[in-house]
Amino acid sequence: MKKKYNLKDLPSIAKDIIENVSNKVLLFYGDMGVGKTTLIKELVRQLNVDDIVSSPTFSLVNEYRSQDGNTIYHFDFYRIEEETEALDMGIEDYFDDDVWCFVEWPDKVKNLVPLNAVAIHLTLNEDQSRTISIK
């Protein structure tokens, strides 16, 4: 799927992602400021989480609980230097659970992500809209 969208479209984009992806591990690619965290905030909201969602830039992972008790993990690997940092935090255990895992900067842990993870590429267009491509 490839689609152009604006902020007002985020709820429908997030709903489509949740309903149609083949795996709960989602890898978010895109330049700084393209809207990865903004999209993840909407995905988490759509999954019925009331918590404040922020990028876990320094903690590497944030955990959220939905109203129905499901766990959602949000990773941000922007600041790691080596994949061993992700291994040390037990990244493989997170991915082995059947829970939603939203991963920003997955290129920093490319050898550790599941082969069947869903890649979501975001790009900023000249008119300030975004294009999302899901593979």
Image: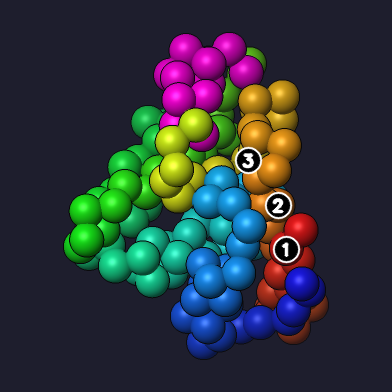
Q: Is residue 133 magenta?
A: no
* Cβ atoms at labels 2 and 1 below 8 Å apart: yes
Q: Is residue 25 left or right of residue 69?
A: right
Dot 1: few (<14), some (14–19), or many (≥20) neighbours within 10 Å?
some
- Please count the marks in the image: 3
Q: Amino acid at mark 3?
A: Trp
Callout in the foreground (2, 3): 2
Span of residues in magenta: 83-95
* Closer-to-camera residue (54/83): 83
Which of marks 3 and 2 precedes in the sequence?
3
Q: Which mark is residue 51?
A: none
Main SS, magenta region, reads: helix
Q: Which mark is residue 105?
A: 3
Residue drawn 45% across the image and 19% down it: 90
Report, in whole angstroms, how far the alpha carbon at label 2 lies from the one at label 1. Answer: 6 Å
Report, in whole angstroms, how far the alpha carbon at label 2 lies from the one at label 3. Answer: 11 Å
Q: Which residue lies under the disc numbered 2?
A: 119
Q: Position of residue 8 (x, y in %)?
A: 51, 87
* Closer-to-camera residue (3/97): 97
Residue 2 visible from this viewpoint: yes
Looking at the image, residue 101 lies above or below residue 3? above
Which of marks 1 and 2 precedes in the sequence?
2
Residue drawn 22% across the image and 53% down it: 69
Looking at the image, residue 31 lies above or below residue 21? above
Q: Amino acid at mark 2?
A: Ala
* Closer-to-camera residue (56/92): 92
Residue drawn 29% across the image and 52% down it: 70
Which of marks 3 and 1 precedes in the sequence?
3
Judging from the image, what secondary structure is the residue with disc 3 in?
loop
